[in-house]
Image (cartoon, rainbow, N blue to C red):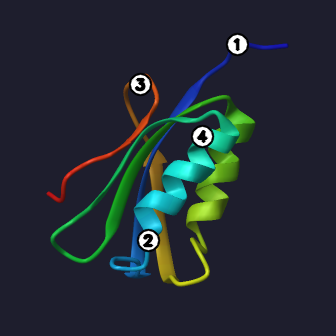
Amino acid sequence: MTNERITRRVVVHGTVQGVGFREFMRREAMKLRVSGWVRNRRDGTVEAVVHGAPEAVEAIVAWAGHGPASAQVTSIEVEDGEGAFDGFEVRRTE
């Protein structure tokens, strides 16, 4: 078993605000044991930074590509991120 950890920054576009995206992502992160945060952005996107085992991070990034049933994701940006976090939090809009 490896202790490798990776961090990714994700920006999700589409109908992703007002549909529970952040709370559903928090629940998914807890299931996958991924740490980090998620927030709405003033431009209508959702931004998240996720940190954990590579398989778990890739799984939550894949989840963000479609989000909860109430969301309509049109595109997703993924790049390397920075930081290690305790738990997963929903942050204020920025």
Q: Earlier in the sequence, mark 4 or mark 1?
A: 1
The residue carrying mark 3 is: 85
* Disc 4 from disc 3: Cα separation: 13 Å
- The N terminus - image quarter: top right
Residue 48 at x, y percent in the picture: 39, 51
- Looking at the image, which is closer to me, 80 or 7? 7
Query: What amino acid type should be assigned to the residue bearing mark 4?
Result: Met
- Secondary structure found at label 3: loop
Residue 38: image location, x then y, percent: 37, 51
Q: What residue is shown with label 4? A: 30
In the rendered view, would you say 22 is above or below 69?
above
The percent position of residue 70, horizontal first and vertical second, equals: 53, 84
With respect to residue 83, does 18 lie above or below? below
Q: Which dot, 4 or 3, sits closer to the camera?
A: 4
Q: Which residue, given by chain and number where applicable, does mark 1 sit on?
A: 3
Total numbered circles: 4
Q: Nearer the viewer, mark 3 or mark 2?
A: 2
Residue situated in front as seen by the camera: 34 or 75? 34
